């Protein structure tokens, strides 16, 4: 049966998502550290972590499954050289269960992780500003099962998360220390009906539009992208529209063109990419025609994550079954993607990809090989060139370079 992240039919190398969740449910639950909810009336202002995107010793945080055989024991800590791309191990932050996706606060002082388990949670981690070590601030219930994605609202006051197994999305307040309060809203996806072969909704991603006016949630089980408005005083979501993909598409990951007028959607199950028009006023998303990922037919590639360069000139797609990265030229001011080539990722099952802050490096987390591969990005042509040998990281499912 096909579905998301670790559950779909794919090359061997570890249990699927349901086995991961079941195994962890049988183990001891992660103890939640109390944090306090806050009144969110203004954007949070904290001293940012000093940035030096081309310097050596930049932080790199790594997500894994702690409940999977051969997995990690928490959030992996490493550094990378912003010029060469070389990665150096730095230990592990324990106390976070199944941190399979990571996101950072806009001011760079707090890291957030999903705890992908049956009783899902989200965890806040204070990042060092003076050469110290990260520390866990606390965890909160995600309000659903199997959280697989999270993001921070541009205001810095709200954490948004998507629960894959239960098909729900949630909002948590962020206080002035970066800690999380209890969820202010949990929205359960229901209509439309699940797609072919699906047992219900499976929320896979939740992001804010570039203009900040809407929150979009991608649901693989319903072949749907939901658009919400976020009440920034109450922390509640109100649905304003939804867009449906063709049955069985299995939408997984969406990313916006910098203009905010278009978004690109990776469909996991039918192995396609779709260019979508986006109306910032209404929040309406209009999917176009599916197009090739350059990585074989449906049911064989399982495209994962899309990135777009800061100048909007190129887009990249991770193909898990094909073990490749596809490069597209972005044309017509964002309205078109033209497939240029695919290159081997240098690992097995690239689950997630991310740019360094200056866009000069691309990191790929390869789940089955337990490695992170790094590429130099030619900012003029978009071409990718390997930055060296893969970096070993147990069941690498997320790489977040800062």
Image (cartoon, rainbow, N blue to C red):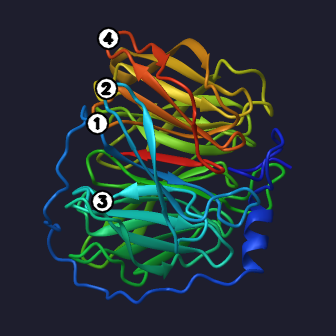
Q: Which residue is mark 3?
A: 105
| Residue drawn at 56 percent across, 27 percent down | 389
Say whether disc 4 or disc 3 marks the residue closer to the N-terminus. 3
SS class of the residue under badge 2?
Answer: loop
* Nearer to us: label 1 or label 4: 1
Q: CA distance from mark 1 to mark 3?
A: 22 Å
Say whether disc 2 or disc 3 marks the residue closer to the N-terminus. 2
- Residue 380 image label: 4
Q: Which residue is mark 1?
A: 56
Residue sitting nearer the eye, 226 or 206: 206
> Would you place residue 286 above or below residue 322 in this image?
below
Residue 228 shown left or right of residue 143 in the figure: left
Residue 226 visible to an observer of this rendering: no
Residue sitting nearer the eye, 89 or 299: 89
Expressed as whole percent of the image width and height from the top left, the position of residue 312 reads 33, 24
Q: CA distance from mark 2 to mark 3?
A: 24 Å
| Residue drawn at 83 percent across, 44 percent down | 9
Determine contact: label 2, label 1, CB under 8 Å. Answer: yes
SS class of the residue under badge 3?
Answer: loop
Q: Which residue is mark 2?
A: 83
Expressed as whole percent of the image width and height from the top left, the position of residue 33 reads 44, 87
Residue 314 shown left or right of residue 343 in the figure: left
Say whether disc 2 or disc 1 marks the residue closer to the N-terminus. 1
Say whether disc 1 or disc 4 marks the residue closer to the N-terminus. 1
Q: Quadrant of residue 204?
A: bottom right
> Would you place residue 389 above or below residue 47 in this image?
above
Q: Quadrant of residue 16?
A: bottom right
Determine contact: label 4, label 3, CB under 8 Å. Answer: no
Q: CA distance from mark 4 to mark 2?
A: 17 Å
Q: CA distance from mark 4 to mark 3?
A: 29 Å
| Residue drawn at 58 percent across, 36 percent down | 266
């Amino acid at each position: 049966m096909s579905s998301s992240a670790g559950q779909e039919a794919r090359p061997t190398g570890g249990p699927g998502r349901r086995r991961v969740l079941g195994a962890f449910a049988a183990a001891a639950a992660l103890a939640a550290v109390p944090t306090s909810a806050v009144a969110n009336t203004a954007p949070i202002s904290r001293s940012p972590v000093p940035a030096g995107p081309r310097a050596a010793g930049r932080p790199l945080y790594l997500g894994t499954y702690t409940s999977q055989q051969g997995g990690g024991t928490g959030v992996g800590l490493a550094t990378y050289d912003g010029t060469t791309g070389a990665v150096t191990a730095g230990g592990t932050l324990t106390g976070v269960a199944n941190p399979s996706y990571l996101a950072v606060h806009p001011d760079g002082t707090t890291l957030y992780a999903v705890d992908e388990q049956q009783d899902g949670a989200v965890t806040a981690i204070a990042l060092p500003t003076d050469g110290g070590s990260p520390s866990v601030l606390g965890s909160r219930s995600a309000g659903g099962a199997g959280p697989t994605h999270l993001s921070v609202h541009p205001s810095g006051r709200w954490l948004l998360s998507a629960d894959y197994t239960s098909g729900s999305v949630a909002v948590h307040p962020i206080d002035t220390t970066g800690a999380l309060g209890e969820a202010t809203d949990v929205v359960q996806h229901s209509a439309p009906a699940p797609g072919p072969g699906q047992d219900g909704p499976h929320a896979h991603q939740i992001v804010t539009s570039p203009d900040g006016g809407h929150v979009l949630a991608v649901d693989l089980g319903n072949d749907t992208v939901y658009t919400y408005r976020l009440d920034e005083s109450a922390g509640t979501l109100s649905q304003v529209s939804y867009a449906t993909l063709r049955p069985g598409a299995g939408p997984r990951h969406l990313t916006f063109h910098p203009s905010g007028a278009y978004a690109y959607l990776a469909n996991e199950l039918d192995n396609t990419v779709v260019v979508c028009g986006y109306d910032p006023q209404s929040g309406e998303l209009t999917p176009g025609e599916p197009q090739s990922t350059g990585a074989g037919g449906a049911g064989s590639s399982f495209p994962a994550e899309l990135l777009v360069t800061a100048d909007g000139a190129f887009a990249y797609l991770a193909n898990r079954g094909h073990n490749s990265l596809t490069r597209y030229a972005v044309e017509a001011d964002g309205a078109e993607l033209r497939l240029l080539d695919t290159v081997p990722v240098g690992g097995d099952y690239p689950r997630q990809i991310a740019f360094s802050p200056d866009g000069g490096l691309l990191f790929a987390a390869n789940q089955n090989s337990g490695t992170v591969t790094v590429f130099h990005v030619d900012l003029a042509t978009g071409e990718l060139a390997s930055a060296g040998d893969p970096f070993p990281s147990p069941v690498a499912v997320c790489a977040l370079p800062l």
